[in-house]
Image (cartoon, rainbow, N blue to C red):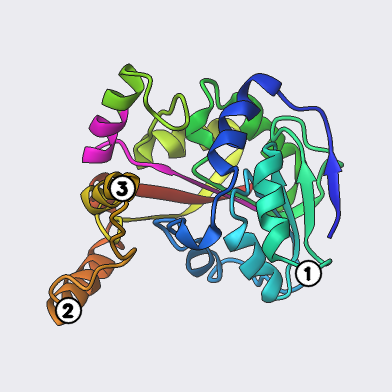
């Protein structure tokens, strides 16, 4: 497994190195949305050159590698990449230590570029999206996955940001309309919209983290009411496919094609 480094912004890596240091990957919740499920109707992963930007745990990129993708995982947190390297021994996956706004790749290099939970951390999204556009092949796909505005998560997050208690320091949010408009400005054509609610819910995750600090460990995925909960999740899965509900979910995403 190759790790390559390029210049980074030291002032921001501190926050994320602290966040990822010593993390057990098994204790980190998977993303709210399932990017692989969403992309497979638009791209055959096998044989495609794929970049996950702001890789974090790298879980989705690694799954794409298992499906035959030529995968690169990029993050500017050294601790993130050390964590990935600790449980991945596949030399086919390339780890890149770099700033997402200045990628060490030639223009028109990738068939797919994707990021989850990244764009919202930039005060200005322009450099990131311009770089995404540069390194994608013409006709290549970009997936952008972000927090959705009209959710209790937004209120809780901004309270914590106000008191300087938010783990990421700063974060914005988007509606499906505002994200679509933004991508169009960079000559991307949206081809698919998606979103989902958190399972388990946000309040359970907050409670679990709080109790963990005092030594009480709740299961990551509680059984709740058993079959009733499963039925509720199935209902959510149907509703999330209707565009109006994309204004109520926790996370939204857009698959867009480079013109």
Residue 249 to residue 236: above or below: above
| Mark 2–mark 3 CB contact (< 8 Å) | no
Q: Nearer the viewer, residue 10 or 32?
A: 10
Q: Residue furthest bottom?
A: 227
Of circles 3 and 1, the one toward us is: 1
- Magenta residues (range): 141-157
Q: Residue at x 56, y 29 (%)?
A: 15
Mark 1, residues whose alpha carbon is within 10 Å: few (<14), some, or many (≥20)?
A: few
First reached walking from the N terminus: tag 1 or tag 2:
1
Question: Is 106 part of what is drawn in magenta?
Answer: no
**In the rendering, at what x and y percent does residue 234 appear?**
23, 74
Q: Are marks 1 and 2 in contact (CB under 8 Å)?
A: no
- 41 above or below 218? below
Residue under the point 82% across and 67% down: 92
153 within the magenta span:
yes
**Could one spot residue 217 in this view of the protein?**
yes
- Residue 22 relative to residue 90: left or right: left
- Nearest the eye: 88 or 247: 88
Query: Is 137 in front, or is 71?
Result: 71
- Residue visible at 50% across and 63% down? 26
Q: CA distance from mark 1 to mark 2?
A: 37 Å
Question: How many angstroms separate mark 3 from mark 1 (CA)?
Answer: 33 Å
**Which residue position holds label 1?**
90
Q: Earlier in the sequence, mark 3 or mark 1?
A: 1
Q: Which residue is mark 3?
A: 250
Looking at the rendered image, the quarter that the N terminus falls into is bottom right
Residue located at (45% from left, 39% from top): 180
Report the residue marked by disc 2: 226
Q: Position of residue 109 (x, y in %)?
A: 82, 49
Q: Report x, y in % for residue 101.
A: 70, 30
Query: Dot 2: what SS?
Result: loop
Q: Quadrant of the C terminus?
A: top right
């Amino acid at each position: 497994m190759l790790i390559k480094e390029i210049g980074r912004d030291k002032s921001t890596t501190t926050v994320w190195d602290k966040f990822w240091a010593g993390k057990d990957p098994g204790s980190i919740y998977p993303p709210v949305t399932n990017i692989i499920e969403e992309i497979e109707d638009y791209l055959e992963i096998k044989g495609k050159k794929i970049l996950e930007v702001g890789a974090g745990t790298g879980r989705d990129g690694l799954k794409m590698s298992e499906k035959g993708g030529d995968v690169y995982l990029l993050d500017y947190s050294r601790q993130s990449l050390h964590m990935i390297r600790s449980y991945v021994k596949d030399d086919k996956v390339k780890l890149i230590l770099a700033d997402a706004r200045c990628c060490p790749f030639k223009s028109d290099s990738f068939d797919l570029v994707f990021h989850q939970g990244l764009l919202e951390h930039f005060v200005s999204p322009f450099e990131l999206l311009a770089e995404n556009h540069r390194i994608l092949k013409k006709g290549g796909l970009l997936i952008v996955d972000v927090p959705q505005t009209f959710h209790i998560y937004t209120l809780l997050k901004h309270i914590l940001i106000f008191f300087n208690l938010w783990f990421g320091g700063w974060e914005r949010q988007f509606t499906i309309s505002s994200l679509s408009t933004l991508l169009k400005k960079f000559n991307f054509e949206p081809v698919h919209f998606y979103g989902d609610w958190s399972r388990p819910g946000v309040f359970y995750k907050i409670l679990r983290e709080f109790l963990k600090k005092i030594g009480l460990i709740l299961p990551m995925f509680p059984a709740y009411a058993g079959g009733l909960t499963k039925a509720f999740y199935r209902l959510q899965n149907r509703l999330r496919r209707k565009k109006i509900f994309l204004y109520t979910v926790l996370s939204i995403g857009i698959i867009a094609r480079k013109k």
